[in-house]
Image (cartoon, rainbow, N blue to C red):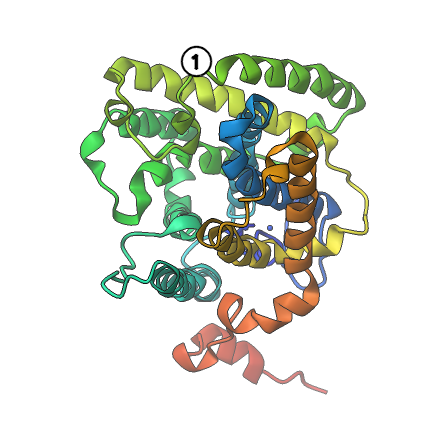
């Protein structure tokens, strides 16, 4: 779901959002790595499925347990890939233009669109449109813009990941941060982006070995069992990373422990997820380039389901109903990631906007140079 600095990233990047072969994604003539497109597609399916489960949680402990498991790693998996494909970001004019057209402009367009949609569905003409208060899914684009702007800084510091973990821990004990640009989420998810900046192609190869794939099975099984036990004992809002410890009714030191504990848990589950992602081209590989489109558009359907009571039929809250909802959500988001839908919404997600930028002098010189004969 990410658009990354490189064309391959989650456009989650082209992004949130956000992803080529391992080293030089997006460079002319480079082939996209099927692994990352597959990972992005499977992750966006989990995002949509997780959203479709929200109205079913109250009536099913099993659905709530699966919901916890999915929310523990689906966004970290996206964010790590976003960081990985932001490794080369600097303030070179063409990369800044891509950041603006691939992240900032979609944020503005969909923040306005979501706000107008919310005003219409809730019949609330007084609702204000604010670019400083991301509504629903647009927080990821705001976060991605901020994270990528800081990428050069993380290449300079000596211990980037420990520093990012410290910042996340300080955020979770700071209730006065406020809601502007959803900074709690930006800072609490920051370590995953910074980790992605530090990764190399061989790190992804490491988790894709056969023994890791086999080990991932009992790890996920144990996680589901633990989640089933924790459903009635744990505040699920911890997994959203949008509140401080004090706002969740806990002392500050619990926030620090939960910040570090959830990071480790999410990292293990993300590694297990990557281990299961196929590295070869699949029928859904091409959909990996449209995950930002699927991410942003499916939000309108999720909110429509709540507004127009699509979950009212009783049979949807039974086991077979939950299966039906899961399959339907996966099918719908798959459709929204397809190339025809991407082309329709390219004006909002990948605008050219050549009229808005000066041509870089170096680029002008390169285009103007003619080879001697």
Q: Callout 1: helix, strand or loop?
A: loop
Q: Return the residue found at the far bottom.
A: 373
Image location (x, y in percent) of residue 112: 36, 65
Q: Is residue 3 visible?
A: no
- Up the image or down, 271 lies above or below 221; here it is below
Q: Return the residue found at the far left.
A: 176
- Up the image or down, 251 lies above or below 67; here it is above
Q: Residue at x 75, y 23 (%)?
A: 213
- How crowded is the residue under tag 1: few (<14 C-alpha within 10 Å), some, or many (20+)? few
Q: Is 253 placed left or right of 72 in the picture?
A: left
Q: Quadrant of the C terminus?
A: bottom right
Which residue is labeled 1 in the image? Answer: 233
Image location (x, y in percent) of residue 254: 31, 14
Q: Is 60 placed left or right of 372 in the picture?
A: left
Nearer to me, 172 or 92: 172
Image location (x, y in percent) of residue 330: 67, 46
């Amino acid at each position: 779901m990410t658009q990354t600095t490189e064309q391959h990233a989650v456009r989650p990047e082209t992004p949130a959002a956000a992803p080529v072969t391992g080293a030089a994604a997006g460079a002319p003539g480079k082939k996209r790595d099927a692994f990352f497109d597959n990972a992005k597609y499977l992750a966006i399916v989990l995002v949509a499925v997780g959203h479709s489960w929200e109205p079913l949680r109250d009536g099913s402990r099993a659905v709530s347990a699966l919901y916890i498991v999915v929310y523990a790693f689906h966004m970290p998996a996206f964010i790590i890939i976003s960081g990985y494909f932001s490794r080369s970001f600097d303030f070179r004019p063409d990369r800044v233009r891509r950041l603006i057209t691939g992240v900032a402009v979609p944020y503005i367009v969909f923040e306005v669109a979501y706000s107008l949609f919310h005003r219409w569905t809730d019949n609330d003409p007084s609702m204000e449109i604010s670019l400083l208060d991301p509504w629903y899914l647009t927080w990821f684009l705001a976060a991605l813009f901020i994270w990528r702007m800081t990428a050069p800084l993380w290449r300079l510091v000596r211990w980037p990941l420990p520093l990012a973990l410290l910042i996340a821990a300080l955020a979770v004990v700071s209730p006065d941060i406020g809601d502007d640009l959803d900074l709690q989420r930006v800072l609490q998810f920051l370590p995953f982006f910074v980790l992605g900046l530090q990764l190399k192609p061989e790190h992804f190869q490491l988790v894709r070995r056969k023994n890791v794939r086999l080990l991932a099975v009992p790890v996920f099984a144990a996680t589901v069992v633990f989640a089933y036990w924790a459903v009635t004992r744990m505040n699920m809002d911890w997994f959203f990373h949008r509140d401080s410890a004090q706002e969740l009714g806990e002392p500050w030191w619990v926030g620090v422990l939960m910040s570090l504990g959830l990071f480790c848990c999410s990292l293990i589950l993300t590694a297990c997820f990557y281990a299961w992602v196929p590295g070869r081209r699949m029928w859904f590989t091409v959909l990996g380039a449209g995950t930002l489109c699927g991410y942003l558009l499916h939000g309108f359907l999720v909110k429509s389901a709540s507004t127009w009571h699509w979950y009212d039929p009783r049979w949807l809250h039974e086991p077979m109903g939950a299966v039906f909802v899961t399959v339907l959500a996966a099918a719908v988001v798959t459709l929204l990631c397809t190339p025809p839908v991407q082309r329709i919404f390219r004006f909002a997600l990948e605008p050219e906007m050549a009229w808005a930028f000066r041509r870089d002098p170096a680029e002008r010189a390169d285009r103007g140079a003619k080879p001697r004969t």
